[in-house]
Amino acid sequence: MESGSENTTNRVYISSQEFGWVPAQIVSNEGKTVKVSIKDYEDDLQIPACEVSTSLTSLSKFDRRKSPKERNISTIEETVDITKYQDNVLPLQNVDEDGKLIEVEDMVDLSFLHEAAILYNLKARHSRGIPYTRTGDIVIAVNPYEWIKKLYAEETRSFYADKLVWNPRQDVDPKTDVEPHVYETSSMAYRGLAVDGQDQSILVSGESGAGKTETVKILMSHLASVQTSSHCATKDHHDHHSDISPIVGRVLDSNPLLEAFGNAKTVRNDNSSRFGKFIQLQFETEDPTHAAFAGKTIPSAVLAGSKCETYLLEKSRVISHEEEERTYHIFYQLLSASESQKVMFWDKLADTDNESFSYVGYTDTDTIEDRSDEQQFQCTIDALAIVGVKDDILKDLMRAICIVLQLGNLTFDEDPENDENAIISSKEELTDLSELMGVPEDIVGKSLTERTVTARNETYKVPLNVIKARDSCDALAKEIYSNTFDWLVNAINNATCAEKNYKENPKADFGLIGLLDIFGFESFAVNRFEQLCINYANEKLQQKFTLDIFRSVQQEYEDEGIELGDVTFSDNLDVINLIEGRMGLISVLNEECLRPRGNDSAFVSKVYTMNKDSDCLYKDRFFRDYQFGVTHYAGPVTYDATNFVTKNMDTLPLDLVNCRKACTNSIVATGGKPSSDGKQKKKAPERRGKRSNLTRKNSSLVSDSVGTKFKSQLGQLMSNISETRTRYIRCIKPNKIKEPRVMQHISTVEQLRCAGVVAAVTISRSAFPNRLEHEQVFDRFMCLDKSFSRSDNTETEESVVQNDVDRLLTSVLKDVEKVEGEGESIKVLKGFVCGKTRAYFRAGSLELMESRRLSAFGDLAIDMQRIIRGFVAKSKYFKLRKASLKAQAWTRRNAARRRFKALRKAAIMLQCWTRCIFSQTTLVQLRRERGAVLIQTHWRMAVAITYLKAYRSASIKIQACARGARQRPIYRAALKEKQEEAKLENQLKALQRKLEEAEQKRIEAEKKAEEGANTGKTVIVYKDASEEKKSGDGQARPSAVAQSVQGPPATVGQLSAQQQTLMDESGKMLEYLRKEVFKLRSQNSQLRTDFDLLKENNQRLMDANASAGASFAALNQHAKQLSKANMKIQAEATKYKDQAHKVNMAQIELKEELKMKQGTYIAEVHSRLQYQKTMARIVDLIQDRCRDYRLVEDVLRLSDECESDYMGGPTGVDLTPSKPQGASSLDLSNTPMATGLTSMTSKFKSFFG
């Protein structure tokens, strides 16, 4: 308990020049000094959000990267002088009993609210990736340096719109139902406009890089989508504006244009806005009465358009910028565009880059927000087209930018004839500029190097030196770019304003929600005229902010029932008077601009002389004569007045004005002034007597000063804002290294002060620095009054709690009461004030109670020890009692268990006998049923087998007859062909044999003739058998005739003639044989072809036979078994001769039965035929008369299914008749059974072909 008290009362913050605020722990209190224990941090990145937290998640990202050894930071002790702190009290940490930081969403709920508490609460939330925190109505947005998708999802938008706009809780503040978010501010602004009918404004401020521009874009996007997510606040009503209109798209898409022309890269931010803008979103608000009649609980407010006003464009950035910075984005975008686009705008842009123009120069950055300059340029072109800037207007706009670029490339040298005069040395650049502007070269050159002066009705030319000529050129470039920017803003307003673009009701009285994105308070090493104007604007906004905070505190105190007389706050009216008063900085500067030889040092001297009584103006002894200091609300700032007079005038000589007006570019010539400025200029003659109209006599410079114009603009802005309900968003840049979840203390504290958050805390806690909820008072301080007890009566709960808190705090803080006044005006001033829900403590009261609470914990510890000892003794007694009760229960349980087991055993035996009797009866019944089923099964099986055998035998016989009838004609034809072939072969062989014999005989005859010629013997001539047959009537003649030739023997020539005859006959025979052989070969080839065909058919038959072979194998196996049985039967044939007669009779009966079955089969075929015909007639009738083709298709399908089921034969095959060739014995075409069949089984098709 003691450690918990130390964690809550000894944890404090001490001031540090290096780290801002550092957490510490009080070691001892020595009156005006306090000894504290702190960690020796090397960097504020190592400091966790709460020093006590040791978990890794509580460490910063930088600290997590270190090893545990490196995170072991040493502890040191220091002595702190508490007199340097407010109310002589160190600021306490908001920690719980464990020493962990109490993190809150609304910092108003912090028990100890001060600068250090705000810093560490923001750091704790930022380290967890939560960028938004609330301080009353103020939303503090810490730049997370990463896009958190969940925070900006469509579901999140709809959630905030539903909770804060369409369905808020009526009994409590609706902001308690949501976490802090910029959507909270936009939703409350929308509801204030739609429900309360009051114009709204949201002021977004912060330094460069804090995320102001991105926050404004998020706000605009949400305000445009609130109405679309509402469903018109009812379930049954849909507004016709639910879809986003084109005008809303133009409003949302106009931001890239302003960023391209008004944003630039700086040291702090890659996309820094170099101007201030006030965007007024115009809404068509619905009358509450009409909404109520329409059934809506919330009137609708539809985004109809927008207007934009800009302030203090940083024109000096056009002509110069730091080395690590860039000028405005549009220059880089134009130069990075494609060559075709650049040539389209100006042909001289071909083959140019950033280094081609002096005003732009080299840069190492070509990507902004993950997009290259070329991609950004395309987005800019698209956005310009949306607002109507395209074609010729777009070309004029880009050529105006080119004119600015080209002015920077002009170079000036001294005139050789006169050193004090300047000439333009870059003639080529001047020619290009002249061509680009459409103005002759001599006019352009003279306007830049000469000045027209009018004095006493005389006009003469004054040549300029090189420096003044260069300044004149730069001034023209700045003026043209500024006018171009104003023209673009005016074009955007014309494209987005509701008066010109909202077609539904252009004359409506539009409600306004203003979004002010303006530069935050600036304090640099060297502060110029721009910083003075920026800080002047922030002083005006801070004044409005302070008044609004005072009103919120006033409202809070009134709600809590606390008197307002004790609330005090400091106002910055004296600073504002110093700047804009009658003797203020602006007036003195204007006066100095009127003097012919006015200078900056004289301006500073007059400021000190005329405002010597002002507490806000200070002077250091080290100041130069051109330096002065102003104490702003955020701190003192030292200004360098160099060029204050020049920058305040900011006017063009008449020569340059005339040159600009002579330009053929309409944007450059007209000056691009918005219509609002024109209206202000029309009022100028009415203010002729006032000093705000700056006029220098004997000079060509005539214009309002920059300070006067800015003062007027700022006054108009504050006037507009004062008529609205103002809400605030303060953007904080957590670190300069742009790392997520890292916070640097010094810069963050400075921003909190500049943003006015600390001032808001000071105002809200001026009278009562600390506050606690009533329940927290009871939890923390009831220990200080042991006699106190909370009451319980019939009053309301709120009043009971309030009275109890008042009684408790009165008794505890009795010694700090003060008596004021005398007599009847005596008033007791307590150290606290009790409100309805909170208790408010004066300075020092809460710290005193915390110290007393620490002492009271010692007494409470003794009481706790007494109670704990009694508890230990009672615990031992209860344990013994519990043990005895357990032993008794164990004994009783064992006895009861034995009795239970005996009864259970008897019951189980009885159950077993009963189950046995029932089981035996059931068994007998089941056996009887099983026997009956087996008998039935065998009987059905025997009958089925008998039918199977009969049907199979009949089918085998039918198949055998069918195969025989098919094969017999084929066999006879093949046999006949074979016989003819054999006959021809025999004839051929006989002829060959005769030929061989005749040849042999001829050879022998030749030999014999040769021998006879040699010997003189008689020649024997042999004749052919064919000649023998020809000579005579068929009687046999000898095959050889011997002729005895009387007289001289025959000659060799005669024998050769006979042989020649024989040879001729043989040749004819051979020719005949050749023809026969050729004929036979042709027939043989044809037969071979037929044979191959038959072979293929045979192969198919063999395949079919093989498929049937498997079934035949099974049948064969069964046949073998039957043959074995038959052998046994034959062995016993003698024994059963008497029974053979009976078997024969049974066979005869089976044959008769088969005949009867055949008759039945034929009758069934007739009935099926009749069914088919009837079904055909029904189908034809339906097809002819039915118009529903689907019904016809269904009937046809059912008919086919019925036919396939009904027409199947008993054998499971179709019975389509076919008359095979040569199968006269099986010709069934004339039978009645065959006439009605329509199909044949595949088996019969293979048999009959």
Image (cartoon, helix red, strand yellow):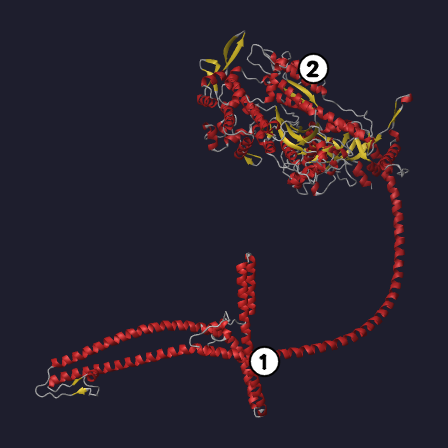
Task: Mark 1 or mark 2: name the one nearer the start of the chain.
Answer: 2
Q: Front-most of 1188 and 930?
A: 1188
Q: Residue at (71%, 23%) from the top-left corner?
A: 543
Q: Label 2: how many residues lie within 10 Å, few (<14), some (14-19) or many (20+)? A: some
Residue at the disc numbered 1? 946
Q: Front-most of 91 and 474?
A: 474
Residue at the disc numbered 2? 611
Say left or right for 733 vs 1151: right
Local SS, label 1 = helix
Residue 931 location in percent, x, y? 69, 79
- What is the three-letter code of the residue carrying label 1? Thr
Quadrant of the rendering where the N terminus is positioned: top right
Residue 999 location in percent, x, y? 21, 81
Residue 1125 location in percent, x, y? 57, 85
Local SS, label 2 = loop
Image position of 1043 with respect to 922: above or below: below
Q: Residue 1060 occupies which quadrant of the picture?
A: bottom left
Q: Front-most of 1031 and 764?
A: 1031
Q: CA distance from mark 1 to mark 2?
A: 138 Å
Quadrant of the rendering where the C terminus is positioned: bottom left
Which of labels 1 and 2 is toward the front?
1
